[in-house]
Image: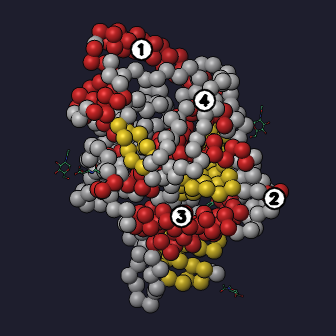
């Protein structure tokens, strides 16, 4: 089809899909309501669910629970009322615990057409227990993600994610969440391209993802093994993404995982050393040094952007993998079915060290006085690290299409899945900063 990527074809498809979904939603709701009323075992509350210990019976019921119907795709009106809710600004949402939540995800693989095969864990049979947990910060609640509320906050705005495949993971999560309440069309790229832009039509919200594993200039080094390595120019930002900053309202920058491979470091076009190498006469600066240097360069570049008035930047902190009994290509797996609790994770490991550096660099740029009042920028964090350390149960593992790959994926996150929480944190921060203009 010649116009395969054209907006016309996509909106035609979306109309068909929307009609089909509406029909199946109606039919399944009728069916589920009849099941609901005929079964006493369905009249349990969230509180009761928390008391239940048998995951197996929970899942049986949760599988049959109707999806919360969203009518947003069918109507162009966003509600006027019920959009204000308060958040506790003083609450540190990065510290808390995962608690059982009987209300399932906002979307499923039937209501979101943007779930990549590699994240469609339900399609490949992953036991669904990981879907029924909720991040509960100590001392406050994170607002439940309401697509219409989010769209109301970002009406007419532009938001971009920059980073690696895990940044894309959050982008796809947000795409699924918001597509429940507004029609979206692709205006640049596609699911496999490095830059992809979507436009939400009723709310005039533009959502973009930009690929940059290192933020700084990275040139593949041909003298490396099959995994590949790069020459990193720590003092030169990758202009491919910074050139797109003007006009953006929000930026979510993240990264880290690519710094755990061997890379060579350059400053002033001079080789100064490496990370994760073992070479004579070459200083190994270590992963965290490179992460700090590149993030500092990235944040300084954002801060010095002259035509980025009012840009709000959030650093999404490190999201760790959960391989057990091996790694990517030697049989590592992640087959846990419940989250770890706080006493089961190492709060002093490398993950926390990376998160600490990311937080420090945000504090550093906030403390710098480069910004003037006419060009005010905001910097904040989405500190997901401690929360995600607990979610060994939320990765695809072996539950994805492994036609070409043989390894288990214990790095990316299932969609829907715990990564959706990052967008709850994002919404919390949008509310928190909405008065800053
Ligand atoms: C969605 O997930 C179900 C299992 O919950 C699976 O049977 C189905 O094939 C999946 N559909 C799509 C379109 O991914
Ligand atoms: C949509 O938003 C853009 C900014 O992102 C703005 O320039 C444009 O005027 C808006 N369009 C409408 C129809 O409101
Ligand atoms: C995405 O776009 C690129 C370049 O136009 C094309 O080569 C690729 O096949 C497209 N991928 C998909 C999944 O449509
Ligand atoms: C920027 O994008 C171009 C075109 O896709 C690519 O060739 C180049 O390597 C990119 N630059 C960096 C620093 O990644
Ligand atoms: C970078 O190189 C230039 C000359 O190419 C030199 O003048 C400058 O001092 C160097 N800067 C650093 C930090 O080494
Ligand atoms: C998880 O995998 C380990 C080996 O990697 C195995 O011993 C264990 O039985 C598995 N657990 C489940 C619940 O499948
Ligand atoms: C954490 O989990 C472990 C293992 O399941 C358990 O022994 C321990 O009591 C739990 N701790 C808390 C504080 O819940």
- Mark 3–mark 1 Cα distance, whole angstroms, equals 45 Å
Q: For the residue with label 2, is its CB less than 8 Å from the closest atom of ligand 2?
A: no
| Mark 4 or mark 2, earlier in chain | 4
Where is 102 relative to 188, above or below?
A: above
Q: CA distance from mark 3 to mark 4?
A: 31 Å
Q: Nearer the viewer, mark 1 or mark 2?
A: 2
Q: State the image coordinates of residue 287 (x, y, percent, origin top left).
A: 45, 72
Per the model, the C-alpha gap separating discs 1 and 2 is 53 Å
Question: Which numbered marker is on residue 234?
Answer: none
Rounded to the nearest angstrom, the CA distance separating label 4 from label 2 is 32 Å
Return the disc, 1 or 2, that comes first in the chain's sequence.
1
Viewer-closest of 251 and 198: 251
Above-or-below relation of 333 to 236:
above
First of labels 2, 3 by sequence position: 3
Res 60 quadrant in image: top left
Question: What is the spatial separation of the Cα atoms under label 2 and label 3, in whole angstroms?
Answer: 25 Å
Ligand 2 appears in which quadrant? top right
Q: Which residue is mark 2?
A: 373
| In the foreground, 286 or 66 | 66
> What is the quadrant of residue 327 in the picture?
bottom left
**Residue underneath mark 1:** 29
């Amino acid at each position: 089809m010649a116009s395969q990527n054209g907006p016309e074809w996509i909106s035609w498809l979306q109309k068909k899909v929307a009609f089909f979904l509406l029909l199946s939603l109606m039919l399944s709701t009728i069916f589920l309501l009849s099941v609901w009323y005929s079964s006493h075992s369905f009249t349990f509350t969230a509180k009761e669910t928390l008391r239940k210990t048998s995951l197996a019976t929970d899942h049986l019921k949760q599988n049959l629970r109707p999806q919360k119907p969203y009518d947003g795709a069918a109507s162009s009106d966003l509600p006027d009322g019920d959009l204000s809710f308060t958040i506790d600004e003083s609450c540190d949402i990065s510290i808390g615990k995962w608690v059982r939540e009987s209300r399932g995800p906002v979307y499923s693989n039937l209501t979101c057409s943007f779930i990549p095969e590699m994240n469609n864990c339900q399609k490949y049979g992953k036991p669904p227990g990981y879907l029924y947990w909720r991040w509960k910060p100590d001392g406050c609640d994170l607002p439940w993600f309401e697509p219409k509320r989010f769209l109301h906050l970002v009406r007419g705005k532009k938001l971009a994610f920059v980073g690696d495949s895990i940044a894309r993971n959050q982008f796809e999560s947000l795409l699924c969440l918001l597509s429940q309440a507004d029609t979206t069309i692709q205006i640049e790229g596609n699911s496999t391209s490095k830059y992809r832009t979507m436009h939400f039509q009723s709310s005039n919200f533009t959502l973009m993802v930009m690929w940059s594993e290192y933020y700084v200039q990275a040139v593949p080094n041909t003298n490396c093994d099959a995994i590949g390595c790069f020459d990193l120019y720590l003092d030169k930002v990758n202009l491919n993404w910074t050139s797109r900053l003007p006009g953006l309202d929000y930026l979510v920058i993240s990264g880290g995982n690519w710094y755990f491979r061997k890379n060579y470091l350059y400053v002033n076009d001079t080789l100064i050393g490496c990370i994760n190498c073992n070479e004579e006469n070459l200083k190994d600066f270590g992963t965290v040094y490179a992460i700090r240097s590149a993030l500092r360069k990235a944040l300084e570049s954002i801060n010095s952007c002259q035509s980025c008035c009012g840009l709000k930047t959030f650093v999404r902190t490190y999201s760790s993998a959960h391989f057990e009994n091996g790694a990517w290509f030697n049989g590592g797996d992640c087959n846990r079915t419940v989250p770890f609790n706080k006493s089961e994770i190492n709060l002093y490991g490398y993950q926390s060290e990376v998160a600490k550096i990311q937080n420090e660099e945000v504090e550093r740029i906030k403390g710098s006085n480069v910004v003037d009042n006419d060009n005010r920028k905001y910097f904040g964090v989405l500190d997901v690290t401690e929360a995600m350390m607990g979610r060994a149960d939320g990765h695809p593992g072996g539950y994805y299409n492994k036609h070409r790959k043989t390894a288990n994926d214990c790095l990316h996150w299932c969609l829907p899945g715990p990564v959706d929480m990052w967008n709850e944190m994002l919404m919390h921060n949008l509310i928190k900063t909405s008065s800053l203009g």
